[in-house]
């Protein structure tokens, strides 16, 4: 979710495709919890220990704008930290607390939380335990944000670090919670590191996430 599209030899190539161009109607909550016009890399000051490039966020937002859903400005709240397992996002942990804190900060200017966009799990493929943790994670966030029916759009993996990708994908695609939609990244083009999506793949996933989100709005 943090975005590794366009990375080569540990650096982003700087190319911003048309689908990820900035817009005055697309904002980003930066690391200081201040709104600014969103530009790639979206996670540059959040997942700052790793090189970030193109992710699905701006492709998602631009696709939403093109759908004319009449939701006004779009505020993206980057929270992803690459290379983490779902157990590291447990309730009360530092990553979870930061996510919830940033979600609350996003509301201070009158915004409305419309959905969670979740793309994570390559590191979880080293074992096959994820399903219960993933469902609890979504349930905990909804509870702590007092939004029990908050839509969730998650992505089923395209690649893996370990041998259990089929188990993890099965859990992601089969999660049994209301208002959760899963889009499938299988077959998307992988980038130079052999693990994360290419710029092309990130764009396609962002657009699929927008299509799924639009179904909630409808």
Image (cartoon, rainbow, N blue to C red):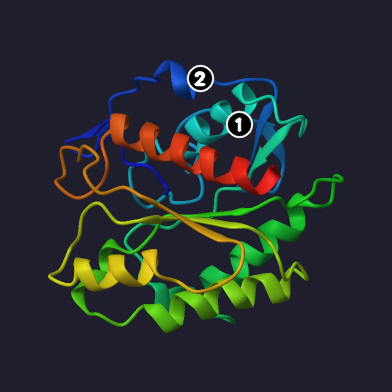
Q: Is residue 131 above or below residue 216?
A: below
Give the residue drawn at x 65%, y 49%. Answer: 216
Image marks 2 and 1: residues in contact by CB distance under 8 Å: no
Give the residue drawn at x 20%, y 66%. Answer: 165
Q: CA distance from mark 2 to mark 1?
A: 13 Å
For the question of whether residue 182 can be seen, the reply is: yes
Q: Nearer the viewer, residue 76 or 149?
A: 149
Image coordinates for residue 50, horizontal then vertical, percent? 34, 49
Find numbered disc 2 in the image and state the secondary structure of the residue it sits on: loop
Image coordinates for residue 217, horizontal then vertical, percent? 69, 44
**Disc 1: which residue:** 64
Q: Is residue 35 above or below residue 177?
A: above
User: Dot 2: few (<14), some (14–19), or many (≥20) neighbours within 10 Å?
Assistant: some
- The residue mark sitting in front, 2 or 1, is 1
Q: Is residue 46 above or below residue 145?
A: above
Which disc number belongs to residue 21?
2
The answer to which image quadrant residue 157 occupies is bottom left
Give the residue drawn at x 69%, y 20%. Answer: 24
Q: Nearer the viewer, residue 80 or 118?
A: 118
For the question of whether residue 53 can be seen, the reply is: no
Image coordinates for residue 76, horizontal then vertical, percent? 62, 42
User: Dot 1: few (<14), some (14–19), or many (≥20) neighbours within 10 Å?
Assistant: many
Q: Earlier in the sequence, mark 2 or mark 1?
A: 2
Tell me the quarter of the image containing the C terminus. top right
Of all residues, the one furthest to the top in this rendering is: 18
Find numbered disc 1 in the image and state the secondary structure of the residue it sits on: helix
* Relative horizontal placement of residue 151, taking residue 171 as reference (left or right): right
Give the residue drawn at x 15%, y 38%. Answer: 192
Image coordinates for residue 30, horizontal then vertical, percent? 62, 43
Instruction: Give the total number of marks visible in the rendering.
Output: 2
């Amino acid at each position: 979710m943090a975005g590794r599209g366009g990375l080569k030899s540990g650096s982003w190539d700087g190319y911003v495709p048309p689908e990820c161009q900035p817009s005055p109607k697309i904002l980003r909550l930066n690391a200081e919890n201040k709104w600014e016009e969103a530009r790639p890399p979206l996670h540059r000051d959040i997942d700052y220990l790793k090189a970030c490039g193109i992710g699905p966020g701006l492709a998602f937002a631009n696709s939403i704008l093109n759908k004319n859903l009449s939701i006004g400005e779009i505020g993206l709240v980057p929270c992803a930290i690459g290379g983490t397992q779902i157990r590291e996002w447990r309730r009360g942990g530092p990553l979870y607390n930061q996510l919830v804190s940033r979600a609350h900060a996003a509301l201070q200017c009158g915004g409305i939380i419309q959905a969670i966009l979740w793309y994570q799990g390559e590191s979880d493929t080293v074992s096959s335990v994820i399903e219960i943790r993933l469902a609890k994670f979504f349930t905990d966030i909804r509870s702590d944000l007092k939004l029990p029916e908050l839509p969730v759009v998650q992505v089923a993996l395209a690649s893996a670090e370990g041998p259990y990708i089929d188990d993890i994908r099965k859990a992601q695609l089969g999660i049994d919670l209301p208002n959760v939609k899963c889009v499938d990244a299988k077959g998307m083009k992988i980038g130079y590191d052999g693990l994360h999506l290419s710029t092309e793949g990130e764009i396609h996933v962002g657009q699929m996430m927008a299509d799924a989100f639009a179904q909630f709005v409808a």
